Image (spheres, rainbow, N blue to C red):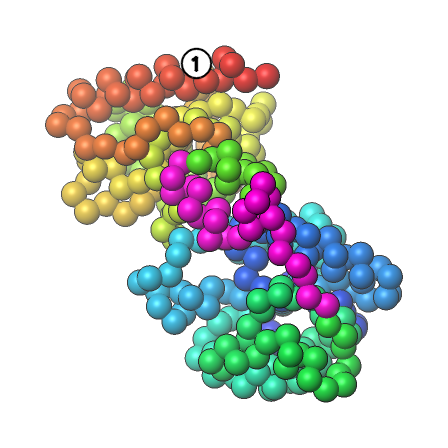
Amino acid sequence: MRVSRDLNGAAAGPVALTIGNFDGVHRGHQAMLTRIVEAAADLDLAPAVLTFDPHPREYFAAAHAPPRLSVLRSKLELFRAFGVTQVWVARFDARLAALPAEAFVHDVLEVALAARWVLVGEDFRFGEGRRGDLDLLRARPRSFTVEAMRTVSIDGERASSTAIRRALAAGELERAAALLGRSYTISGHVAHGRKLGRNLGFPTANLPLRHRPPLSGIFTVRVHGLSGGPHRGVASVGVRPTLESHGTPVLEVFLLDFEQSIYGRRITVEFLSKLREEARYPDLDTLTRQIGADVERAREFFATQP
């Protein structure tokens, strides 16, 4: 899969293109990716995606932007898995935010990306002030035709990034998984921490989080990316209130029955069930006893799994 960050760079050839943020690459997004690959094969075009980084809402109001469901690398991996062969990652900045809708259509879609078939959601908006919509895309003869993707609903609920964030925040991991089409995961490289978990008898793999996570608390997890895996574990996502007065969110994973050194390794943490909310304890002894109880509950959970 070819990935480019330059919207002015020439396309490898005419493309069938879908456009969006694709945060989480949920089942609605997956339907779009499946459709774009099918259409590209029918029309002898390359299946392509135009996405944005950062999310436009992070650009316009960073303090109020929703937590990300996926980092860029995870999105790209899923695009490739669905058969996409070309991705443009557009930096959403002042220049792009101020680009008139007609200029976006002509300069970007028609000229720079050589789009010949375009798939967007029914509520797609683009261009300065979000003035562009489906009607503008279809306003005059262009070098491409346009198709609108209908909403995908799961058990009566629209598959959307907002709905998934809501489910994760509430600890409803099964609901989030139904909307995503898979369990929610966080990937990253294991970093050195303060070794406090080791001193308490529960050494953890620490994954620094660049962005605010959409969930918090203590969870049962599976960890992928290590030899002999997947491995069972207990994860904490939060600010460690017993240890930090002004902590930043971190993901810590205690792997059950695992003693290898894995610093620097890239792992994927799959969230299975929520055990409890994060809490502040009066001392380390109380915290240690609670961690031990969490581990026992996790073992009981895994004993019930196939």
The magenta segment: 147-171
- Tell me the quarter of the picture where residue 172 sits: top left
Which quadrant does the N terminus fall into? bottom right
Horizontal placement of 111 versus 28: left or right? right
Horizontal placement of 15 versus 49: left or right? right
Q: Position of residue 211 (x, y in %)?
A: 38, 53
Question: For the residue marked with disc 1, what is the amino acid?
Answer: Glu
Circle 1 crowding by C-alpha within 10 Å: few under 14, some 14–19, many from 20: few
Q: Check the image and report above or below for 49 versus 293.
A: below
- Tell me the quarter of the picture where residue 117 sits: bottom right
Q: Position of residue 25 (x, y in %)?
A: 58, 51
- Residue shown at the point (43%, 13%) measured from the top left: 300
Q: Position of residue 116 (x, y in %)?
A: 77, 74
Q: Check the image and report above or below for 293 versus 100.
A: above
Q: Position of residue 93 (x, y in %)?
A: 45, 75
Horizontal placement of 301 versus 193: left or right? right
Query: Is residue 165 part of the magenta span, yes or no?
Result: yes
- Residue shown at the point (50%, 53%) measured from the top left: 161
Secondary structure at badge 1 equals helix
Which quadrant does the C terminus fall into? top right
Of residue 58 and residue 135, the one placed in the foreground of this image is 135
How many numbered marks, from 0 up?
Answer: 1
Q: Residue furthest front?
A: 156
Q: Is residue 301 visible?
A: yes
Q: Check the image and report above or below for 280 versus 44.
A: above
Residue linked to disc 1 = 300
Q: Is residue 270 visible?
A: no
Query: Is residue 161 part of the magenta span, yes or no?
Result: yes
